[in-house]
Image: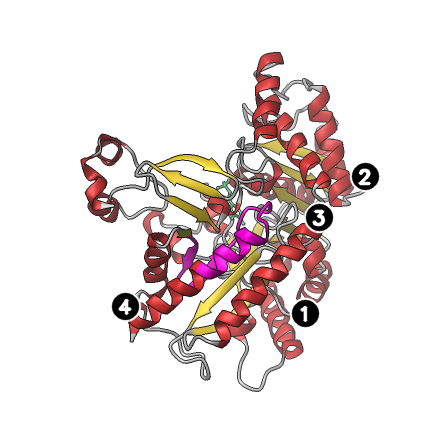
């Protein structure tokens, strides 16, 4: 990108803009990628280059980058009511409809939905509701939250504390006290020699139970988990993991908070990731795919007992002391309703299963012919490729080689946007991809891997 630095967009961006998750020095040296427009699963930059974005931006633009129905739904809503809120008993017809739709879609029978504007806010809302739930039942000391190593749950202070990724803590002195971490259920890296999946699950459950007992069960409010880790490296838990973990949680009266922010709305080949992994949460956080990220809207769907606690704590006349200016924003709600209508019309679950299976077949063929692909894993259109120095022994590359970041650069030059998480390459394309898009992603991935192999040789 360095030649493009003559362009004033790049200069002004470097001069004035603080980027998220970006190394400042690298930005200054290489300049930003200036995105000008989108078209289906593709984006264009200001130098006229086109990329297939095999990450749907940040795992989120499920309907691609310029869906005209979503644009029209937003425009219609802006014309009718461009803002209202949900404090002090206010609502709109669409807010009620979306809440009903989400309760129905998630299968949280008898439950209710709360609206916020980001995934981080949704996750923090779940934590606050967990505190209310326990306090109302006479257990106010149940406050701590357990997350897993390599989890990603957002960037606000409690959400970042729940992350199990050191880079989310390093600059800020996090995690906050009371946010704990247990083992990541990564079969590829976590299973010991001679251990099968069942034994691994038992060890994960035993570690969790030991942590709960060490901290004191009366101090633990909740356990938060993504059905399949996204940003932590596309980690599919071993068979039976959630059932076994939930038995431990139930034993100690600990709530399961389900972060569906990436996995929700078809991504894993089911409407929600909880179906893919067999989890039965008490609360679910939704964002990203909810509106295909065309508007910052998120939601928390809760089981009836959680709402009952909220009702109970305020029965003396108080109000739920929580809310965001843009909770239930009419435009976000209109866009989300339109996105869900489109998911239903396109039969998103069937489409993701077909396209996901096709992409996976391509990746498995690539893996078979590559000395540096250790594993292909994932579900639906959420797939990962783990790079290794030695396939047989699973020995990773020396981190100084920066194998994953090198792949990102090569793929980018080849017009493919993927996402390295260390040496795991992530693929989470828009859910509207067709056969041609999937084949193009795989072909560019194969070409890029061959170049990387030569570079690493
Ligand atoms: N949870 C998961 C699993 C995510 O991947 C993300 C964002 O990538 C978040 C939470 C945080 O969402 P937001 O950035 O909207 O706050």
**Disc 3, SS:** loop
Q: Looking at the image, which residue sits at the far top?
A: 80
Q: Position of residue 227 (x, y in %)?
A: 62, 56
Q: Is residue 354 left or right of residue 155?
A: right
**Disc 1, SS:** loop
To which residue does mark 1 refer? 239
N-terminal label among 2 and 3: 2
Q: Which residues are magenta?
A: 417-443
Of the two numbered discs 4 and 3 in the rendering, the one whose residue sits closer to the viewer = 4
Q: Is residue 145 left or right of residue 314?
A: left
To which residue does mark 2 refer? 110
Q: Looking at the image, which residue sits at the far bottom?
A: 194
- Ligand 1 contact, mark 3 (Cβ < 8 Å): no
- Above or below, 135 against 86 in this view is below
To which residue does mark 3 refer? 282
To which residue does mark 4 refer? 400
Q: What number of labels is visible? A: 4
- Above or below, 448 against 156 in this view is below
Find residue 6 and report its image quarter. top left
């Amino acid at each position: 990108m360095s030649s493009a630095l003559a362009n004033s967009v790049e200069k002004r961006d470097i001069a004035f803009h603080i980027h998220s998750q970006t190394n400042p020095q690298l930005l200054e040296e290489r300049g930003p990628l200036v995105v000008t427009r989108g078209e289906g699963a593709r984006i264009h930059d200001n130098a006229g280059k086109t990329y297939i974005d095999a990450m749907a931006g940040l795992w989120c633009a499920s309907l691609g980058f310029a869906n005209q129905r979503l644009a029209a739904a937003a425009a219609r809503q802006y014309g009718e009511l461009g803002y209202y809120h949900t404090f002090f008993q206010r609502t709109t017809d669409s807010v009620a409809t979306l809440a009903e739709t989400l309760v129905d879609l998630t299968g949280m029978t008898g439950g209710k939905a709360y609206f916020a504007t980001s995934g981080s806010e949704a996750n923090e809302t779940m934590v606050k509701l967990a505190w209310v739930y326990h306090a109302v039942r006479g257990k106010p000391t149940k406050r701590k939250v357990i997350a897993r190593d390599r989890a990603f749950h957002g960037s606000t202070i409690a959400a970042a504390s729940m992350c199990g990724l050191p880079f989310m803590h390093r600059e800020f002195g996090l995690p906050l006290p009371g946010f704990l971490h247990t083992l990541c259920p990564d079969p590829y890296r976590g299973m010991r020699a001679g251990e099968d999946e069942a034994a691994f699950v038992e060890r994960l459950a035993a570690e969790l139970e030991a942590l709960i007992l060490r901290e004191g069960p009366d101090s633990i409010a909740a356990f938060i988990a993504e059905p399949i880790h996204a940003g932590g490296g596309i980690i599919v838990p071993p068979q039976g993991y959630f059932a076994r973990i939930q038995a431990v949680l139930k034993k100690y009266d600990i709530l399961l908070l389900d972060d569906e922010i990436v996995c929700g709305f078809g991504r894993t080949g089911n409407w929600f990731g909880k179906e893919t992994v067999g989890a039965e949460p008490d609360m679910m956080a939704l964002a990203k795919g909810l509106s295909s990220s065309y508007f910052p809207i998120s939601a928390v769907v809760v089981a009836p007992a959680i709402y009952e606690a909220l009702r109970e704590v305020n029965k003396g006349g108080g109000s739920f002391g929580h809310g965001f200016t843009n909770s239930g924003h009419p435009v976000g709600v209109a866009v989300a309703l339109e996105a869900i209508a489109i998911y239903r019309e396109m039969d998103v679950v069937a489409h993701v299963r077909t396209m996901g299976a096709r992409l996976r077949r391509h990746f498995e063929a690539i893996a078979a012919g590559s000395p540096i692909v250790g594993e292909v894993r994932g579900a639906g259109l959420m797939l990962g490729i783990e790079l290794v120095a030695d396939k047989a022994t699973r020995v990773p590359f020396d981190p100084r080689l920066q194998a994953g970041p090198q792949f990102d650069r090569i793929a980018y030059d080849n017009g493919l946007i993927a996402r390295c998480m260390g040496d795991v390459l992530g693929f989470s394309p828009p859910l509207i991809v067709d056969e041609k898009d999937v084949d193009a992603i795989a072909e560019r991935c194969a070409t890029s891997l061959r170049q990387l192999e030569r570079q690493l040789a």
